[in-house]
Amino acid sequence: MEIALSQIQPQSRPDRLLLRTLKGETAPRPPFWLMRQAGRYLPEYREVRAQAGGFLDLCLKPDLATEVTLQPIRRYGMDAAILFSDILILPHALGQKVWFAEGEGPRLDPIRDQAGLDRLDVAHLEERAEPVYEAVRRIRAALPDPVTLIGFAGSPWTVATYMVEGAGSKEFLHAKGWAYKDPAGFQRLIDLLVETTVTHLSAQIRAGAEVVQLFDSWAGALAPAEFARWSIAPTRAIVRALRDKHPGVPVIGFPRGAGVGIQAYVEQTGVDAVSLDTSVPLDWAVSALQSRVPVQGNLDPMALVAGGPALRRAATDILSTLGKGPFIFNLGHGIVQQTPPEHVAELAHLIQEWPSSNQG
Ligand SMILES: Cc1c2[nH]c(c1CCC(=O)O)Cc1[nH]c(c(CCC(=O)O)c1C)Cc1[nH]c(c(CCC(=O)O)c1C)Cc1[nH]c(c(C)c1CCC(=O)O)C2
């Protein structure tokens, strides 16, 4: 597997820009990476994906996971690589059956009661996820020094929705039903996910992850009291435990769709930085959030599909607003498959040349 990174322009990636931003520095141009930066929009990803067999096989073959993690870094020179894995590796490593039906998204054998919880096998988590940690070691060894390696996990609420529904969902009938009717029982699932998420992230950090991100993709589906209990409280517990074990390793939280709830999330979880979805107004983000923590985000992935003046305008707006404080340029959600790779190159160039690329 070819892992030379010779095409990367060293001058485009000042030393450890992402880590410095997470400590509160404001750089002349912000660091950037993109959620789902490795994925089906890249022809070289599709090639490796075909070779791997299934999607989970790709996540669990360290040589292939390493290769696809490095692909976008080679092409675009992002300031950070994110481990190529999935939030559903955790339920898989807990012994729940997880598979990806081609073209349909994730499927799991649903867990809906205490008996289902009792079948989970916490003791062998690190053994079953060992290929992921091996990938982290290989990626860190292959990355140029200035590129930061980000590990990740799903937040307990978001992972619980998949474990309970058995698939992606819009309404969360079973997960919310359990949480409303039997909060003590659902709490046991959340507590188990807090504990095992700490184990999983801690193992990634020991293997070489320098920052971790918690994806709470379905935070926005929760009413305020439930958001406090199932998103904020578990996130705070994870942040505390990680800070204890790995002081100085920043945690980025991504409470997608949480709206004004993001402010309470930032104040109460202790995350080192917050990732913003596309709906978050930039001026509000500056006053309500960036005054407290570095922010990350939040270009509409569809602006990246559109390209041209719309992309330049949207990116320039974000750079000139959020870029005045500690800021990591990213998308508001993951890159979609229909994204032309040359639009990503154009965006990378705009950010790397900022502020001189600003033509008003
Ligand atoms: C909800 C969620 C999942 N996975 C993830 C989330 C949270 C973020 C979000 O809201 O998108 C997180 C995730 N998934 C993936 C990463 C890799 C790192 C990155 O580049 O950001 C990350 C951080 C790879 C992936 N995870 C997945 C892909 C596409 C799989 C493929 O190549 O076939 C990738 C690149 C699959 C996946 N995995 C999951 C879904 C809903 C899907 C889509 C199914 C599909 O598109 O068919 C669960």
Image (cartoon, rainbow, N blue to C red):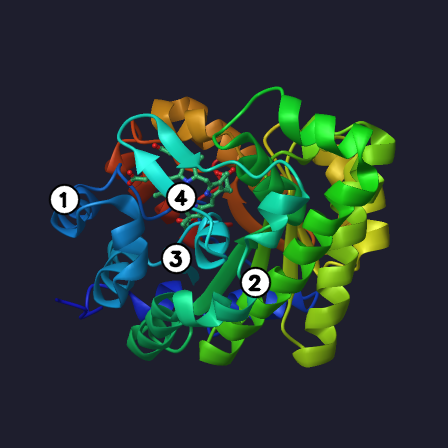
Q: Could you say where residue 342 lies in the image, as x and y percent from the top left?
A: 25, 37
User: Which of marks 1 and 4 precedes in the sequence?
Assistant: 1
**Which of the 4 quarters of the picture holds residue 174?**
top right
343 vs 206, left or right, is: left
Locate the N terminus by quadrant.
Answer: bottom left
Residue found 49% across the figure and 63% down from its top: 151
Disc 4, disc 1: CB below 8 Å? no
Q: Could you say where residue 81 lies in the image, as x and y percent from the top left?
A: 40, 61
Number of the front mark, 4 or 1: 4
Residue found 78% across the figure and 57% down from its top: 236
Disc 1, disc 2: CB below 8 Å? no
User: Which of marks 3 and 2 precedes in the sequence?
Assistant: 3
Under mark 1, the amino acid is: Ala
Number of the front mark, 2 or 4: 4
- State how far apart marks 2 and 3 are (Cα): 16 Å
333 vs 143, left or right, is: right
The image's mark for residue 78 is 3
Disc 2, disc 3: CB below 8 Å? no
Under mark 3, the amino acid is: Met
Residue named by callout 4: 98
